[in-house]
Image (cartoon, rainbow, N blue to C red):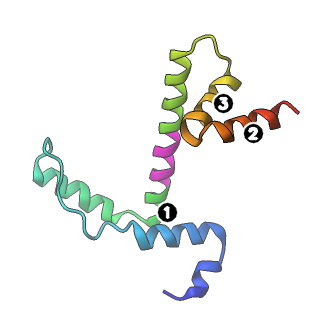
Amino acid sequence: MNRKMYFITSSKKILLFFKKFFIFNSMKTQSKDTDPKIEKVQISLLKKQSIAKKFAQVCSLSQITIQLSKRSIARKNQNLDDKQVNLLFITHQYGKDLADRVFQYLNR
């Protein structure tokens, strides 16, 4: 791949990175609870998707994971407001130092 292609735009850079490192060329059946024939069909469908579609699915999965994590924090800490839930999420994911800096920034 030509080096110049990596510098076209930030979104294209992300897609090129994704294409280079996350192509499903070497996928093998792995699920113990899925019939191998069905899993091969699933892998085939994944291989046929465009890079943009695969990237969108990864972004969607990441967003859902964040939402579920925040919901869990809120359920376990019902006395916290949204801001406090978000800060606790930052603490769990990125550490207390960053959460403290975000807190200080928000309370300027």
Q: What stretch is highlighted in magenta?
A: 56-64
Q: Do the residues labelled 3 and 2 touch (CB within 8 Å)?
A: no
Report whether 80 appears left or right of 22: right
Which residue does the numbered mark 1 point to in the structure image? 52
Report crowding for label 3: few under 14, some 14 to 19, many 20 or more residues within 10 A (C-alpha). some
Magenta span has 63? yes
**Circle nearer the N terminus (2, 1):** 1
Report crowding for label 2: few under 14, some 14 to 19, many 20 or more residues within 10 A (C-alpha). few
**Residue type pointed to by label 2:** Arg
Up the image or down, 108 lies above or below 55; here it is above
Q: How far apart are marks 3 and 2 (CA)?
A: 10 Å
Which residue does the numbered mark 3 point to in the structure image? 87
> Which residue reaches farthest right?
108
Q: Position of residue 68 (x, y in %)?
A: 48, 30
Which residue does the numbered mark 2 point to in the structure image? 101
**Circle nearer the N terminus (3, 2):** 3
Q: How far apart are marks 2 and 1 (CA)?
A: 34 Å
Q: How far apart are marks 1 and 3 (CA)?
A: 32 Å
Element type at mark 2 = helix
Element type at mark 1 = helix
Up the image or down, 76 lies above or below 45; here it is above
Point 56% across, 19% down: residue = 74
Can you say which quadrant of the picture contains the C terminus?
A: top right
Point 20% across, 56% down: residue = 41
**Residue type pointed to by label 1:** Ala
